[in-house]
Amino acid sequence: MWRTLLSRGRLIDGIAAIFVVVIVTAATVTAPTHWAPFLSTVETWLADLRAAVLAKPMKQDDRIVILAIRDSTLVKQAYTSPVDRALLADAISAIAAKGPKVIGLDILFTRPTEPDKDARLKAALENAPAPIVVAWAEAGRGLEKGEAAFLAGMAEKVGKGWPNLLKNERDAIVRWFATEFGPPGSSAPLSFPAAIARAAGVEIGTGTRLLDYRQPPDAEKPPFRVFPLEAGALMPQAWLAGKIVLIGADLAGTDRHRVPGVARLSVGASSVPGVYIHAHAISQLLDGREAPETSLAVRIGLALAAVLAGVLIATVLSPWPLQLAVGVLAAFALVGAGFWETAGGGPSLPMLTPVLGLLTATTGGVTLVGRRLKREKRFIRSAFTHYLAPAVVAELEKKAEVLRLGGERRELTALFTDVAGFTSLSEDMDPQALGLLLNRYFDGMCDAVVKTEGTIDKFVGDALVALFGAPAVRTDHAERALACALAIDRYAEQFRRAEAARGVQFGVTRIGLHTGLATVGNFGGEARFNYTALGDTVNTAARLEGANKLFGTRLCVSGITAAACPGQRFRPIGDIVVKGKEAPVTVFEPAGMNGEEGPAWSGYCEAYERLREGGARALEAFEALARQYPDDGPTAFHLKRLKSGANGTLVKLTEK
């Protein structure tokens, strides 16, 4: 039965473990984007940290020149917002004359200023020999109708692109850019970086991309060449010819945005002007670079590996300090894998969520294992506490694996007892009184077994079967079994005499002991099992118990058992061949069964040696011994054999 319960418990634990793996893996993958978005924020910060620490310098991109509108640009202007249109018109005309590939203005012209200056700017835009792209927006998408109308007039004959930056909604950091941004039917469907790249003759593709920020060559040199706008007219033609020139604001509090830590390396500030971010996107389009991203399959695989590792740590390893150490190492391994992948130019693998998955799975696994172990301990205690010593039960609770499902071969010592004449007694007694008598009798018997850390296998009527060396392993099982047998003999004799004084003729308790290999384990049907031992060892112990009747003894011990008890003296009884077997079993009786050793003991051993040798001297010796000790069972047995013409120590049993 206990096998069924334990098997069902392990099946339930297995199903629970699978449930933990599936649920925790799914949670690990989906948590950052669905039910725990803060994890995504922390995860991206960790990715930013790795990228910043492991950033590899890149050559300065000389294809792009940024002309920044700074405080120095506006210091002599009558007003600073919007930027003086005449200043812009003159700068565009001067720059366009130097042969740039494209000029991009990251400026929204949404309201009029001075009419003549507005006209000058419009003319400069339309008459420039180089392609012009200006920032664009439409009514209902950031602009009022009047603003949109003015912008449309200013940018009527030039390229247009949406300057909107795609930010993470949780940390407001610019992490992506789009190639197409305008709504369906828009006159300007492209984003500002895409419009400039297309004007430069580059295939831009479609969709939204992760921004791969270009790293500076060193701490002193930015990823792009940057000059103040007023320097554009003074620059040599070679500095601008064939370049993409971007004009935009680099002013405190104007068009500045948060970027990942790796991008801050290029400006040394926590926020970056929008025109700089557009430069990074344009550079990425020119190179055809794609920032490495972690695919869903990789995230699932990493989460599954972390969760499985957690479950294995919890279910395979013990004790808990080892689980803790391996768990910490596994967490560091996941973190190290993330840094290693980033250092190799790969995607930023998730680190936080797999580590959380590992810890969650480990915790869940430890909980499941703890519940199973507690359940097994409770069952072992309830199943064996009546049959084993408390110390043995405690040992089995710690090592439940010794209760192997099925059978295993093991050396043990079997003890078999029976009460002489019990059948006749049971026929004469009231059933209730008989039950009470047996219970009192078995109380003392069981105490002897438990005190010597044996296992009470079963009760068969008035017979008791006990095992030593199973299920708990005991290397001294033979000595424990002998000590138990001697204790049972003393108790049974006291019990018999006490019952005789009460008028109950309770029979002599006969005991057989044998040591050998047996198959121990759980045997029975699908629904009911019993832990027991099978094989000749138990059968031989039963035959030795029965041989006591023939020898006139109360305890027969096989030679194998006697040899394993060097601290006990024995006298030989004979070499018996049990019914159905051919090989003889040497049988002994321990000293002390009938009081202290004396002349009867030494005289018997001398007579037995003559019996072993054969001849008339054995008969003489046993006749003399019988006259002195007429109540000694083995002496009477061998004398009877010798008188009937038998000789030697070999005895064949004709009854089981």
Image (cartoon, rainbow, N blue to C red):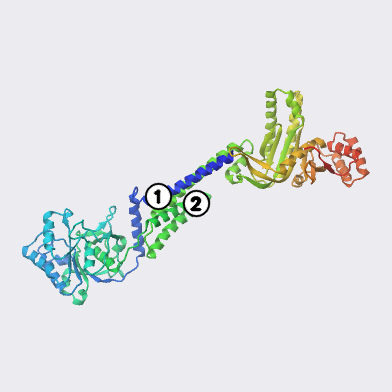
Tell me which residue sits at (35%, 59%) in the image.
47
Left or right position of 552 against 458: right
Give whichever of 170, 498 is nearer the camera: 170
Residue at the extreme front of the image, as rendered: 185
- Place residue 596 in its image quadrant: top right
Quick one: SS at disc 2?
helix
Query: Residue 138: x, y in percent?
Result: 16, 56
Q: Is residue 337 above or below residue 654?
A: below
Query: Residue 473: x, y in percent?
Result: 65, 46
Is residue 326 at all visible to an observer of this figure?
A: yes
Left or right position of 603 against 150: right
Query: Residue 419: x, y in percent?
Result: 75, 32
According to the image, label 1 marks what residue?
A: 26
Quick one: SS at disc 1?
helix
How many residues crowd mark 1 within 10 Å: few (<14), some (14–19), many (20+)?
Answer: some
Question: Quadrant of the image for the C terminus?
Answer: top right
Tell me which residue sits at (49%, 54%) in the image.
326
According to the image, label 2 marks what residue?
A: 312
Query: Residue 135: x, y in percent?
Result: 18, 62
Question: Quadrant of the image for the N terminus?
Answer: top right
Query: Of the residues shown, which amino acid type is indicated by label 2?
Result: Leu
